[in-house]
Amino acid sequence: MVGTENGNVISCNRKGKTAAEKIGTIFKAHPSPVVGLQRNPGFVKNFITIGDWEARIWAEDVKESAIMWTGSVTNWNS
């Protein structure tokens, strides 16, 4: 898995023979760059992304949106 500057997370398969087989799923994770990405070592289908002042937890089975996320911090001086 890799996070991009466009806010996407791309899940890849190293054993694929063609380009279409190598790129598995593209998650639209954040509106800004993904700065952190980590798989859950106990449940490998789950992963967390960090970007745009939010953390989001994803499941590979649910491609539409994150299954859990933190609130966005908009004003630190409040």
Image (cartoon, grey):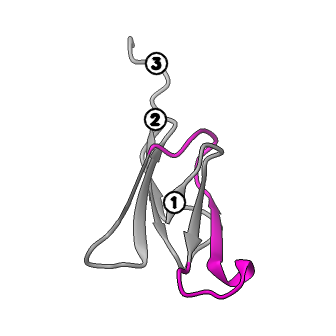
**Where does the image place residue 47, in percent across and percent down from the top left?**
41, 66
Identified by mark 1, the residue type is Val
> Could you classify mark 1 by the number of other residues whose Cα lies within 10 Å: few (under 14), some (14-19), or many (20 or more)?
few
> What x and y, as percent, mark residue 17?
66, 88
User: Which residue is under mark 2?
Assistant: 53
- Residue under numbered circle 3: 75
Residue 3 belongs to the span the image colors magenta: no
Q: Please tell me which residue is depicted at 64% across the width and 42% down the height of the picture.
A: 31
Instruction: Work out which residue is located at the far top of the displayed protein and give it.
Output: 77
Depth check: 2 or 65 in front?
A: 2
Q: Are marks 1 and 2 in contact (CB under 8 Å)?
A: no
Q: Which residue is mark 1?
A: 2
User: Count the marks: how many?
Assistant: 3
Task: Kindly report which numbered mark, 3 or 1, lies closer to the viewer in this rendering.
Answer: 1
Q: Which residues are magenta?
A: 13-35
Compare marks 3 and 2 and give the one earlier in the sequence.
2
Q: Nearer the viewer, mark 3 or mark 2?
A: 2
Dot 3: element: loop
Find residue 73 and report its horizontal and vertical position in percent.
45, 29
Picture coordinates of residue 75, whole percent (x, y):
46, 18
Q: CA distance from mark 1 to mark 2?
A: 19 Å
Q: Earlier in the sequence, mark 3 or mark 1?
A: 1
Q: Are marks 3 and 2 in contact (CB under 8 Å)?
A: no
The amino acid sitting under disc 2 is Trp
Vertical comparison of 7 with 46: above or below: above
Mark 2 neighbour density, 10 Å: few (under 14) some (14–19) many (20 or more): few
Q: How far is the residue under mark 3 from the one under mark 2?
A: 11 Å
Q: How crowded is the residue under tag 3: few (<14 C-alpha within 10 Å), some, or many (20+)?
A: few
Query: Is 70 situated above or below 43?
Result: above
**Residue 29 belongs to magenta span:** yes
Q: Residue at x 56, y 71 (%)?
A: 11
